[in-house]
Image: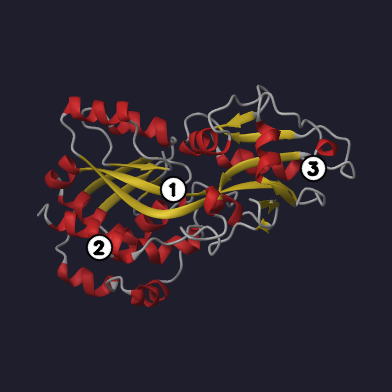
Amino acid sequence: MFMIGAVITTACSDKVGADEPQKKADTEEKASDGSKDSAEKSKETAALSGSVVIDGSGTVYPLMARIAEEYMLTEQEGVSVEVSRAGTSAGFKKFLEANGTDFNDASRQIKEEEQAKADELGIEIKELKVALDGLTFVINKENDWATEMTAEDIKKIFLADGDITKWSDINSDWPDEEINTYGPNENHGTYEFFYENVLEEQDLMNNVNLQQEYSTLVKLISDDKNGIAFFGFGYYATNQDVLQAVAVDFGEGAIVPSLDTIAEDGDYAPFTRPVFTYLNVNHAIQKPQVLDFAKYALDNINVFAGETGFAPIPHDEIQENLDFLEELK
């Protein structure tokens, strides 16, 4: 488990996690976009203690870890916020049990069977949309041929019955070399998004190298000239020195994933998805620190989204969720 306590630690020394914390003054300056100034809010909030426990999506992890870090440094020094990254599905299992986690980060929406489990346990859940992410396909820095591909070609690379196994199958001028495919395993909502929205629920080829840790995927691609992998934009954004992103042609020209193009109405929209954190409302009512952190996270979500590789969400969506949290007093 990655725990940010009194001494801040970084679980992603290989650069796949959140960026290094900025100075408090920089964060307070950023908050002028509509978020409440941290120093001002601290004066209004009584000192709290206890813990907040978050697990789930590895994709959402850098964003939530960055928010948790700043919360403990500038808002509530007596609260310990623990942020882990078991994956969306594995995280929901920890969330949906007696005395489970307080939040589950998710790169997909909750499933019907997961909601049914919550109802069975009497757990009230609130879905909080936190940002927009772009599913990004990455290749080795030395790959100077596959920098642009169509969405259909990418799909066929990963399909069990696809007709693409070598780079030359896409373009005869490309190397006659086997393509090595990588991605996150079934614990991750990113895998499920890829399977449902890119492969359209068709079988994935059997030899895809699926991994639990995103840091492992970064290393594998950085070492494999013939490799291609998929994961959230944030992990590419913090590893651009060793990876390059494939520009995807959805039919009107190749689009490079970026914070601008992965917006809801952006050119990269077919591979854009919302990401979430799910709140245990029962815990928020019972534990003041959980509710306080939820409010802080939403107040500052767009402040930290860009620096961790996510596009912001509209303010009115944030405000609607903040209004819900205010009613829990």
Q: Residue at x 82, y 35 (%)?
A: 169
Q: Image check: 176 left or right of 287? A: right
Q: Image check: 280 left or right of 1? A: left
Please give the label number shown on residue 225: 3
Residue beneath label 2, please? 319
Q: Secondary structure at mark 2?
A: helix
Mark 1 residue type = Val
Q: Do callouts 2 and 3 mark residues in contact (Cβ within 8 Å)?
A: no
Mark 3 residue type = Lys
Question: On the rendered image, what quadrant is the N terminus found in?
Answer: top left
Count neighbours of disc 1 (C-alpha within 10 A) and say few if under 14, some if 14 to 19, many if 20 or more: many
Residue 69 pos. (x, y %): 38, 57
Mark 3–mark 1 distance (CA, rounded to whole Å): 28 Å
Mark 2–mark 3 distance (CA, rounded to whole Å): 46 Å
Mark 2 residue type = Gln
Please give the label number shown on residue 60: 1
Residue 60 pos. (x, y %): 44, 48
